[in-house]
Image (cartoon, rainbow, N blue to C red):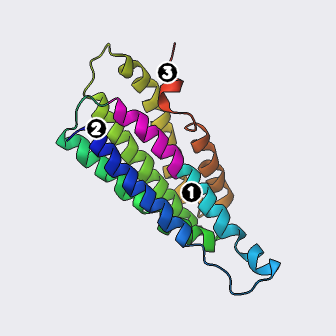
Amino acid sequence: MTTQRLEAFSDGVIAIIITIMVLEIKVPRDVSAAALVELVPIFAAYAFSFVLVAITWVNHHHLIHSAKRVSVGLLWANIHLLFWLSLIPFATGYVGNHVHQKLPIAVYGLVLTGCIGAFLVLRLCVAAQHGPHDAFTARHRVVVKKNLAGLALYAASVPLAFVTVYASYVIFVVIPLQYILPQQRHAPE
């Protein structure tokens, strides 16, 4: 298998994930502005999750292009990531319908923890294909620190949701800001 086939498969799964998320936004039967206002939390959850999936897709694209070959370990690490990403539509709908409730926010945090953890595993699989003095390895060291910090914060968002949902929301917003640009642009000079 080539990296292009792996990327094409992943692109297809991610496109389905985005499609499933938008299908969770039900058209109101009422044509009033009030009916649309009721959809604001659901739409906000969708928009935020869309951005998260888009950031993951962009960084996945750059990471897979850094792979030298497609190994069985890389395939399973990629499937692991897609599993966690496939839970985003459920978690998005759950939190969008219950924006102030602790359990839905904790579930959303758990799914995001799984996503960043799985992406870290995928990154480690790609990094194992590179030598210690490779250009990818220098970037990898910097990004792994960022991944570990994000993993710790997302994991903290789960119990924090039961203390204050707002702390979890802050974590949900802060971490993606670190990943908006592809990993290669964060490389040290």
Disc assigned to residue 49: 1
Q: Which mark is residue 187?
A: 3
Give 158 or 67, whichever is nearer the viewer: 67
Question: Who comes first in sequence, dot 2 or dot 3?
Answer: 2
- Residue at (37%, 22%) from the top-left corner? 136
Distance from disc 1 to disc 3, alpha carbons, whole Å, reads 26 Å
Residue at image coords 19%, 38%? 71
Q: Is the residue 181 above or below the residue 73 in the image?
A: above
In front: mark 2 or mark 3? Answer: 2
* SS majority, magenta: helix
Vertical order, 39 against 166 (above or below): below
Give the magenta part as a residue range.
53-66
Foreground residue among 157 and 47? 47
Q: Nearer the viewer, mark 2 or mark 1?
A: 2
| Mark 2 touches mark 3? (CB < 8 Å) | no
Name of the residue lying farthest toward the right: 33
Residue 14 image offset from top left, x and y in percent: 42, 55
State the separation of the CA atoms marked 2 and 1.
26 Å
The residue that label 2 is drawn on is 3
